[in-house]
C-alpha cells in the first residue's frame, strides 16, 4: 500500500472513530420549546387561544386585574408564584411563604417574567406560559428539564 493511500485510509478510520464517539452514549438536548405546539395538563387551565400572545415564546392572561400601581420596567416588586411543567408537575412555589423581591426588566428573573409582568397592577394575578427561549433554555435548571415550556401563576403584591 502506498503511503498516500495508507494516510487516506488512516484518515477515514480516525474520522469514523470520531463520529462514532460523538454519537455514542451522549444524550441530546431537545429542541427549544414552542408553547403553541405543547399539550398542557388540563389541571393548568391553559387555553392559548384565550390568552394574549406577547411573542411566540410568551402568552399571558390576567386572572385578576389588580387595583394598585402598574408594573413597569425597572419597578421593584414583590410577588408570589407557583410554577409548573406542561404535564402539570409543580416545580416551585412560594405561596404561603416569603414573597420574592426583584426588579422587573433587569435580568433578576427569567426573561419571560421580565416581559410578561409589565403592565400588571398591584393585587393582580396573571397566568404566564413561557417557552424555553424566555425561561431556562437548553440548560434547564434543577427539576426543570432542558428546553421546557413553563406555566406560572403570579400575583404582584407590591410595586414601586
Image: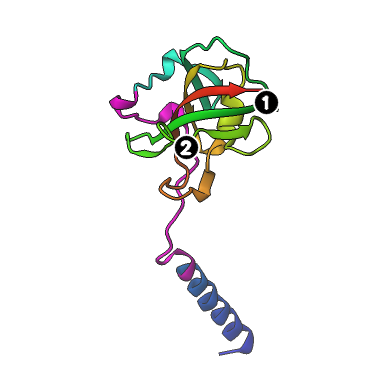
Q: Is residue 140 above or below residue 20?
A: above
Marks 1/2: CA distance? 29 Å
- Tell me what residue is drawn at x 61 percent, y 21 percent: 118
Q: How many marks?
A: 2
The percent position of residue 158, horizontal first and vertical second, equals: 58, 23
The percent position of residue 144, horizontal first and vertical second, equals: 43, 45
Is residue 31 covered in magenta?
yes
User: Does dot 2 land on a helix, a strand or a loop?
Assistant: loop
**Magenta residues, dominant SS class:** loop
Name the residue nearer the viewer: 96 or 82. Answer: 96
Residue sitting at the far left: 42
Is residue 155 covered in magenta?
no
Query: Is mark 1 in CB contact (under 8 Å) with mark 2?
Result: no
Q: Which mark is residue 33?
A: 2
Residue segment shown in magenta = 21-44
To which residue does mark 1 refer?
Answer: 75
Residue 57 in sight in this render: no
Q: Is residue 107 above or below residue 116?
A: below
Amino acid at each position: 500500500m502506498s503511503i498516500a493511500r495508507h494516510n487516506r485510509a488512516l484518515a477515514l478510520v480516525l474520522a469514523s472513530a470520531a463520529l462514532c464517539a460523538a454519537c455514542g452514549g451522549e444524550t441530546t438536548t431537545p429542541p427549544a420549546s414552542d408553547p403553541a405546539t405543547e399539550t398542557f395538563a388540563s389541571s393548568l387551565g391553559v387555553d392559548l387561544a384565550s390568552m394574549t400572545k406577547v411573542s411566540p415564546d410568551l402568552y399571558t392572561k390576567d386572572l385578576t386585574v389588580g387595583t394598585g400601581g402598574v408594573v413597569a420596567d425597572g419597578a421593584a416588586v414583590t410577588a408570589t408564584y407557583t410554577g409548573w411543567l406542561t404535564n402539570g408537575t409543580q416545580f416551585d412555589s412560594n405561596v404561603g411563604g416569603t414573597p420574592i423581591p426583584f426588579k422587573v426588566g433587569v435580568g433578576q428573573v427569567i426573561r419571560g417574567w421580565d416581559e410578561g409582568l409589565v403592565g400588571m397592577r398591584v393585587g393582580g394575578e396573571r397566568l404566564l406560559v413561557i417557552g424555553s427561549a424566555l425561561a431556562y433554555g437548553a440548560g434547564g435548571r434543577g427539576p426543570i428539564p432542558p428546553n421546557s415550556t413553563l406555566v406560572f401563576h403570579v400575583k404582584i403584591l407590591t410595586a414601586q
